[in-house]
Image (spheres, grey):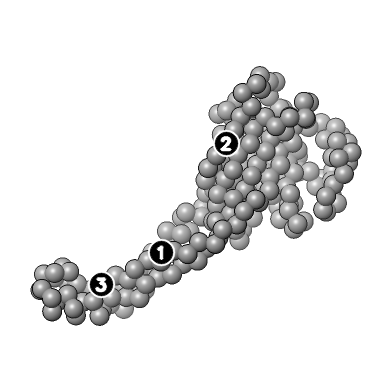
Amino acid sequence: MRALLRILVPAFAALVLAACASTPKLTNSWRDPQFEGPKPAKLMVLGISRSDVHRRVFEDGFSNALRASGIGGVPAYSELPEQGVIPDERIQAAVKKSGSDAVLTARVIRVDRQIDVRPGMPYAPYGPYGRGFYGWYGSAWAMSQPDVVQYDVVTIESTLWDMRSGKVIWSGTSETTQTSDVAKLTEGLAQVLIGKMKADGVL
């Protein structure tokens, strides 16, 4: 039983962490109260990342999610394949060529390292105090070692720009612990953001 507990407690902790990592959480959002429409019909998705691979995976994934929800979506790299800072005139020309009337940008603004310590689990078949001090004392020695889990919490800022006015009409920040699989992160982020932007009347 003691050996089984030493296996199950860390395994359960890992499962809990994996479940928390499955879907990004929207922590804050803002909608321009003066925005009255019309709603954008087609969005260019522009990821801001030093990794060209991550950028392309994100732009593809979010564009696909937009189209699946009935909104036009195009990855920016299809018109803007260059890496690094892109000149304004290049973006302007790409937006016009793609027929987009809005641009959705996303960038990581913060990464926080979290340490979660879960105390060990005592083996006490008669309850923690059922046998008094001597019963408790023996059980205390049977306690499994504390489980220490380290993980990163990533904060992502997403902004919807109305290119007809050049103004921000919606912005939100999200948190996630899913950092290793960009495609999965994008899928969850798109589900949360698209739903919220629709609810807020900007999509």
Q: Which mark is residue 29?
A: 2
- CA neighbours of label 2 inside 10 A, class few (<14), some (14 to 19), many (20+): some
Task: Say which residue label 1 marks.
Answer: 13
Query: What amino acid type should be assigned to the residue bearing mark 2?
Result: Ser
Name the secondary structure under disc 1.
Answer: helix
Who's the residue at 55% across and 39% down the image?
A: 28
Is there any visible trace of residue 180 in the rendered image?
Answer: yes
Residue 53 visible? The answer is no
- Describe residue 92's horizontal placement relative to residue 174 as left or right: right
108 lies above or below 11: above
Q: Residue 113 is drawn in which quadrant?
A: bottom right
Location of residue 101 in the rendering, given as x and y in whole percent from the top left corner: 77, 29
Three-letter amino acid code at the position of disc 1: Ala
Disc 3 residue type (three-letter): Pro
Camera-nearest residue between 54 and 129: 129
Mark 1 residue crowding within 10 angstroms, few (<14) / some (14–19) / many (20+): some
| Residue 122 marker | 3
Q: Mark 2 or mark 1, which has the lower sequence index?
A: 1
Give me the residue at 83% from left, 53% from top. Answer: 83
Q: Earlier in the sequence, mark 2 or mark 3?
A: 2
- For marks 2 and 3, give the CA distance: 44 Å
Question: Could you tell me if the residues under marks 2 and 3 are in contact, i.e. CB atoms within 8 Å?
Answer: no
Are discs 3 and 1 less than 8 Å apart at CB?
A: no
Q: Which residue occupies 37% across, 66% down? A: 118
Q: Is residue 63 left or right of residue 153?
A: right
